[in-house]
Image: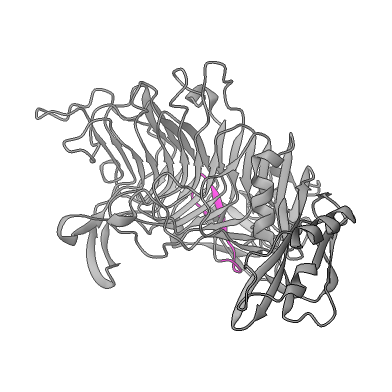
Amino acid sequence: MRRLLAALALSAGTAVHALPPVTPDGPSGPPPCTDAAVVKLTSSASEVVFPNPRTVTWSLSAPAGCKGLSLELDGAVVPATGTRTDRPPRSEQSTLKLMWTGLGQRALLRTARVNVTVRYPTRMTIDATTQRPVQALLGVLDASNANPTQVIELCNVDLDLTGQANLMLTDNRSLVAAPGCERGARSLGPRIFVTDRRGPGKSLFLIRSDKVKIAGFRLEGPTAGIGDDDDHNVEGAIRIWPFGSATSAPITSIVVSNMEISKWSGIGVEVGDAGDGPLPGRLTHPNVGAVRISGNYFHHNRHRGKEGYGVLVTGGGYALIEHNVFEENRHAIAGGSWDGRGDFSGYTVRENLVLPGGGLHCGFLNICWQTHQIDMHGDRGHFDSDWCCGRAGETLIIERNTVLYTGGWRTVMVNGQPQQVWSDGLAIKVRGNPVDKAVVAGNVFRHASRDDAIGQNGSLGIIGDNISNPIDVRPDNVFGADPMATLGSCDFAGDGKADSFMATGVTWWARSATTQQWRFLNAQPQKLAQLMFADVNGDGRCDVVLKPQAPATQPAFYSSRGTGAWTMIGVNAP
């Protein structure tokens, strides 16, 4: 009898599956009237373009007096008939269940399903109005839905991606804050965060392709304190490791910019090269800028003695690291010497600001000390993990940075207890001989001398220092400087609040009174004593004015908002 009723229902045009009840007949099961119950579930569209809506319609027909029947749509109890209009965030299936409850039992009688495929536009926005925004982001990141070029914009969202790992950004894809919603002097920007510890090789975002951009939002890890040994190599935010083959072209543009990346006990941004392709790989010093890490704020990425890096360049990779702020990282920038085959790593580190905090390293018997901030490992060590000597990378260019991290006694918290730590931490440590060169030029150090600021190891051995390719430390480096001792004050953000201004001798920086974060303004050599502040162009934001050399002379040049080139007063800046 049940097979006959099911066949009649399908022949009458029911657009759903009417499955036999899963609970057999009997004194303790559903009554016979439930055999005649029919559920229908239909959708207004089988395919939609995000964020367009679709409507699902459902109904239940059953003999009069047949009791104990109920419907659940995607896990929620719904009436016997109805409609629901939603904006599906990703391709998914809706499920309607016919349930029977009685005699102390609950049984599934029928299940009906409809599918919807979601396509995504070339440019899509995920904002506060987006239904299930996390699912929308996961859906569009699914490579099977990728357009040839795609921009995913975030605005006013706080997305919990706990449990997610290795979310792939493929060729020609951008994940950025929407214009007007990005991180800036007046806004922290959208946030993506996780609260879970993750296993080895499971960064949150993974980039293995070209023409990819991540920009303008916060990316927050799960470790507010200092990671311990169990956290080694487990918490990474962004991993850039392009595929390689004999036919792979050089990488042209992978950008991580204007991000706040914090609380990753492993690595904020990791850059490596194609270990499975031909040497020297797709990232090389002649291709500087192919991977550009620019204008970010890396802070509180800490570990007792393993990673805790703002940026790591390893596995034969190369990256341009410029205009970033580093604060409270074990190493601001670290380097892994090579890929194990002959492709050596390197970086150009240019016009960054390293603030005083960070550098804590704890070892045997919980003894802690200060380590260095800009690092390149060697390819040899006395032990399995110290990588102190040998060949240390290929081409290292460290120029026009400001390093305020220095030595002295500090009070730090170790396992919840204050501990006095002596810091003889260096600014730069190259732990071996570069294959090509290491150049340190035009930097500003708070350290008193070159020996206080810069260190190098050579090859393994017991005689001499074994340094065969010494660091080229140029005479234009400045030691013993403290540009934070005297700061300027003006409203660069246009929010009516006075921001702090720092001129280091190579770069200008402003600390927002709203966000309390330093931001790169310009690469200019003028110091505070040579500058004035005024809203020259009337845009409501502070401009930097070059003081005239003669006191009675009117100023002639200004930099719009401190970010523009020198422009004659009376001429509109671009």
Q: Quadrant of residue 359?
A: bottom left
Q: Vertically, is 346 above or below 256?
A: above
Q: Residue at x 47, y 62 (%)?
A: 486
Seen as rendered, the residue at the extreme right is 12
Which secondary structure dominates the residues rendered in magenta?
Answer: loop
Seen as rendered, the residue at the extreme left is 462
The image quadrant where one finds the C terminus is: top right
Front residue (pair 137, 523) = 137
Magenta span contains residue 504: yes
Q: How is the image coloured?
A: one colour
Classify residue 447 as left or right of residue 468: right
Residue 516 position, x and y percent, is 55, 66
Magenta span contains residue 248: no
Seen as rendered, the residue at the extreme front is 1
Res. 538 in view = no
Residue 215 position, x and y percent, is 63, 48
Front residue (pair 75, 34) = 34
Residue 443 position, x and y percent, is 43, 41
Q: Residue at x 61, y 46 (%)?
A: 214
The image quadrant where one finds the N terminus is: bottom right
Res. 344 in view = yes
Q: Quadrant of residue 369?
A: bottom left
Residue 332 position, x and y percent, is 41, 48
Front residue (pair 287, 195) = 195
Q: Residue at x 77, y 46 (%)?
A: 120
Q: Residue at x 23, y 31 (%)?
A: 380
Q: Vertically, is 77 above or below 74?
A: below
Classify residue 138 as left or right of residue 443: right
In this picture, which residue range is highlighted in magenta? Answer: 503-515
Q: Vertically, is 523 above or below 363?
A: above
Number of callouts in the render? 0
